[in-house]
Amino acid sequence: MSSAFSLAVKPCVAWSNGKLLSRKSTRRAARAEVIVAPKKRTSTHNVPELSKQGIPHTDLHVREIVKRQSTDKSAMFDVCQKPHFHPMFLEEAYERCRNICAEYAKTFYLGTLLMTEERQKAIWAIYVWCRRTDELVDGPNAAYMSSAVLDRWEERLHDIFNGRPYDMLDAALTDTIYKFPLDIRPFRDMIEGMRMDTKKFRYANFQELYLYCYHVAGTVGLMSVPVMGIAPESPVSAQSIYNSALCLGIGNQLTNILRDVGEDSLRGRVYLPQDELAQFGLCDRDIFSRKVSDGWREFMKQQITRARFYFNQAEEGASQLDKASRWPVWSSLLLYRKILDAIVENDYDNLTKRAYVGRTKKLLMLPLAYSRAQSATHLGLSGTRFLGF
């Protein structure tokens, strides 16, 4: 919503972005105990190359999700089960989703305008659900957050999938579910990511961090592919395209984390692998001191390289999406890469500065994203790399 959509949730994106839906890393005021690593400085020449791989997709049940979301929708539900909403009610529900997306994910929203009307509405509905989920733990009422709140939200999700929406925004998602082969698993996994964010304050290694990124952002990509659609002429397996969507969500979330290191540190949050910090002679104390050292710059170069690795892996899938869905995907991809560029331009100071892409650069990016989306039609996996959402 990525996110993210990008959708990144708040980016909600998705392929997202999200922000649909890449989700902005959550922040709460509770400060965790500072973990102190040995202060021994390691020469950058002796630092091993950081692992770029995360959790195997088989462990995340991605294959099962792809299989279920590739099933003919008519075979999944009895016609009698489909809820019937008054057309004017649904029109207002989707209009509210559109307004929320337009307000909080402006660049991604512009990209959705080239999609078919049915796909536009579906993406907006998914974005809104992801954003609402994110705000349970990162919104104005986050102070009242509890496990019971998330349990009730998950029960409400099951009601949505069973045709019993609680409110108008839920109804938009219920209608979307009956139009597209969406599986409940990615939605449930995102809620689990919110649970992680209420009790986990440090990440021992990248495998732990990857699992978090999957839950809060990679899931957005899995939600979005059935709506975006796969090009009929695509020679690539659906599994490969879903893998690309998942990689984009991971890349978006890693970018969110790197952009927000300083802001998160003010709340006692460190979304960075502790073992890799130690490899560069760093620890939480260096982050809380907000001092940009040579060791920090070298560490950040490695982290940015990893994020770009996931974007490169994700690119392969964008040219295989339905042509009308590629523009928002490209918009998300180019925007998030620009954020990484901004961190570099700030001399890797993400402790006292927040990297951002200005409005002018965003607007100039849209024609480029559109051009690349249109030129991707006949490119396969051996062609120029692309990706999205």
Image: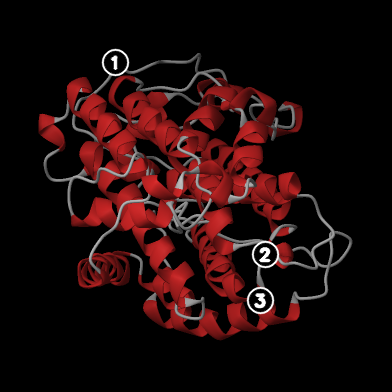
The mark that comes first in sequence, 3 or 1, is: 1
Choose the circle earlier in sequence order: 3 or 2.
2
Q: Tell which circle, 2 or 1, labels the residue nearer the N-terminal end.
A: 1
Label 3 – label 2 distance at C-alpha: 10 Å
Q: Residue at x 32, y 50 (%)?
A: 129
In the image, residue 28 above or below residue 285? below
Say what amino acid the circle numbered 2 marks.
Answer: Leu
Q: Residue furthest right?
A: 382
> Which residue is the site of mark 3?
373
Q: Is residue 69 left or right of residue 231?
A: left
Please identify the quarter of the rendering in which residue 162 is found. top left
Badge 1 is on which residue?
Answer: 33
Q: Residue 141's spot in the image, x, y percent?
A: 11, 40
Image x and y of residue 203, in percent: 47, 22
Where, quadrant-wise, is the N terminus in this rendering? Answer: bottom left
Q: Label 3 amino acid? A: Ala
State the SS at label 1.
loop
Q: Nearer the viewer, residue 210 or 15?
A: 15
Q: Which residue is mark 2?
A: 321
Where is residue 384 drawn, in percent x and y?
Answer: 81, 67
